[in-house]
Image: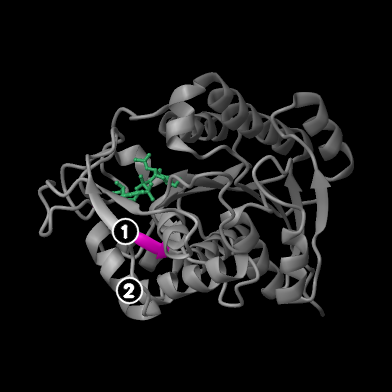
Amino acid sequence: MQNKVRKVLITGGTGYIGSHTAVVFIEAGYEVVIADNLSNSKIEVLDGIKKITGTKPEFHKIDLSDENITSDFFKTNNNFDVIIHFAAYKAVGESVQKPLMYYKNNLNSLMNVLEAMLTHKISNLIFSSSCTVYGQPDELPVTEQSPVKKALSPYGNTKQIAEEIISDTLASNNYLKAISLRYFNPIGAHESAVIGELPLGVPNNLIPFLTQTVAGIRKELSVFGNDYNTPDGTAIRDYIHVVDLAKAHLFAAERLLKNKNKSNIETFNIGTGQGNSVMEIIKTFEEVTAQKVNYKIAHRREGDIEKVWADTKYANKELAWKAELSLSDALLSAWNWQKRLS
Ligand code: UD1
């Protein structure tokens, strides 16, 4: 007997992580449906997904933060085995300027999706959370048990509140299950250079700013602070290849579908377990691409933490997932993607 094809709804599926996740699920034999309002992504991403996988996923341009639109969508689209909820705003600085826009969008969309899951008895949710919930951890590497610290931005706070909303909703409904994945710093692009990160305007994140600088779009990269308590003075993060990160969602989905979860809500760190400083990123980029990075040392950026990297033992053991691609792979893929864009 043939196995039934599993159907997954990916909200925010034309976005950076969402599009790579769509590829992973299509390649694993899932039927993928994408819902996205295209507020921070382009419809052409669907062609990129088709080019890589041979399949163009079903697409719905909808705003999930709108209650009526969301409930209408789910009236005719509800036979999902899993929902992966990416749809959210993600710029830390912008969230400080426009907090209500962040709370409304990120939390309403989650609540509308949860409501639909309850109404239509859709059991499995994967939520995209962030290592930002740990703030500056007291101990490194940071485990899932580390305390959640007061968020440094409205964006970070939406991730914390979202985890609580999910947890409270699950506590009152025993057929709902969720896995919250706390991402460290996703970087890089699909090896085909057909999909990747598409920052609108001046990028905030390190890698797109770096690749745009090397491509001549930006004059120079500012290294935000070299007086941190780290070996070379620059801040340390756990940079994970977006394709590895995307694959973690597949392992999470399989865990939910096979009922291997140990509690109705589980949380996993999704990182490499390795920390790299900003200067190490620049040096490695220069080595693997043979390009020079024009940079200067600048003041620390407000709200930045000094260092964080993941303890990934729990995810390695329970999800049977491990990051496999190297920092060099990630940086090279980011450069190949940038070359295609510029
Ligand atoms: C932030 C968020 C994280 C979010 C991620 C992607 C926090 C604490 N972190 O991560 O939750 O998932 O953005 O949106 O809210 N840097 C420079 N020059 C630059 C840009 C960055 O030196 O032009 C440095 C930063 O100081 C930092 C590192 O590079 O040390 C990484 O920065 P960035 O890519 O912006 O990510 P985070 O701030 O770590």
Q: Does residue 108 appear left or right of residue 74 in this picture?
A: left
Q: CA distance from mark 1 to mark 2?
A: 19 Å
Q: Residue at x 26, y 37 (%)?
A: 147
**Looking at the picture, which amino acid does disc 1 mark?**
Asp
Q: Does residue 183 appear left or right of residue 48 in this picture?
A: left
Task: State which quadrant residue 78 falls in.
Answer: top right
**Vertical side of 318 occupied by 233: above or below:** above
In the rendered view of the protein, which quadrant contains the C terminus? bottom right
Q: Nearer the viewer, residue 170 or 312?
A: 312
Q: Earlier along the polypeptide chain: callout 1 or callout 2? A: 1
Task: State which quadrant residue 40 falls in.
Answer: top right
Residue labelled with disc 1: 238
Q: Secondary structure at mark 1?
A: loop
Can residue 310 be seen here? The reply is no
What is the span of residues highlighted in magenta in the rendered image?
236-240
Q: Residue at x 52, y 32 (%)?
A: 171
Main secondary structure found in the magenta portion: strand
Q: Is residue 40 magenta?
A: no
Q: Residue 81 placed where, x, y %? A: 72, 55
Q: Residue 41 placed where, x, y %? A: 67, 49
Task: State which quadrant residue 50 falls in.
Answer: bottom right
**Vertical side of 1 occupied by 314: above or below:** above
Q: Does residue 178 appear left or right of residue 52 in this picture?
A: left
Per the rendering, the mark at residue 257 is none
Indicate if the residue with disc 2 has its beta carbon within 8 Å of ligand 1.
no
Residue labelled with disc 2: 286
Q: Label 2: few (<14), some or many (≥20) within 10 Å? A: some
Tag 1 and tag 2, C-beta contact below 8 Å: no
**Looking at the picture, which amino acid does disc 2 mark?**
Glu
**Vertical side of 250 occupied by 307: above or below:** above
**Vertical side of 101 occupied by 183: above or below:** below
